[in-house]
Image: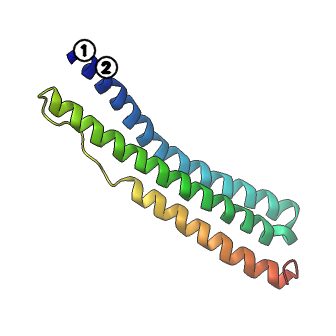
Amino acid sequence: MCDALKEQLKELNSRSRWYSSQLWYIPFAYFSLVAVTLANVINKQPSQIGIALIACGVLGIFVIWHMCLIMNGEKRAIKHLKDVEEKLSLDSTVEEKPYSYPFLAGVVVVTINSLVFGILLSCRCGLIQ
């Protein structure tokens, strides 16, 4: 039983670290994708910037959803990690840190702005009526 709990402890520790790293990587990948997309559209087809912003906003909705799922997975892994540490009579070494919330807020801001400005620009250019 003890060996199984130790193995579970290792797996949960690895899993919680993976979730934590994803909460850093995903927002930066999204911000980079938005920046590259807008730079390319502005240079090549400036009349399509509204559509590009809408596309970035829609992608942002999926990124927000994915980040929420990752945050939930991280919370579950930390909870199970604490349970296993308790069963093994170890001092609790893990805690949930709210560092991912500013990144989530940044993705939300970029998503909302992309959608709003994309719709406004598309309406102004006559792409959406």
Q: What residue did someone put label 1 on?
A: 3
Q: Badge 2: how crowded within 10 Å, few (<14), some, or many (20+)?
A: few
Snapshot quadrant of residue 93? top left
Secondary structure of residue under mark 1:
helix
Who's the residue at 77% across and 64% down the image?
52
Secondary structure of residue under mark 2:
helix
Front position in the image: 34 or 63: 63
Q: Position of residue 112 (x, y in %)?
A: 60, 72
Q: Is residue 61 above or below residue 13?
A: below
- The three-letter code of the residue at mark 2 reads Glu
Who's the residue at 30% across and 50% down the image?
97
Q: Position of residue 92 (x, y in %)?
A: 17, 37
Front position in the image: 58 or 30: 58
Q: Quadrant of the C terminus?
A: bottom right
Q: Is residue 7 above or below residue 39?
A: above
- The three-letter code of the residue at mark 1 reads Asp
Number of numbered labels in the structure image: 2
Q: What residue did someone put label 2 on?
A: 7
Q: Position of residue 41 (x, y in %)?
A: 81, 61
Dots 2, 1 in contact, CB < 8 A: yes
Who's the residue at 55% across and 57% down the image?
65
Q: Residue furthest top?
A: 3
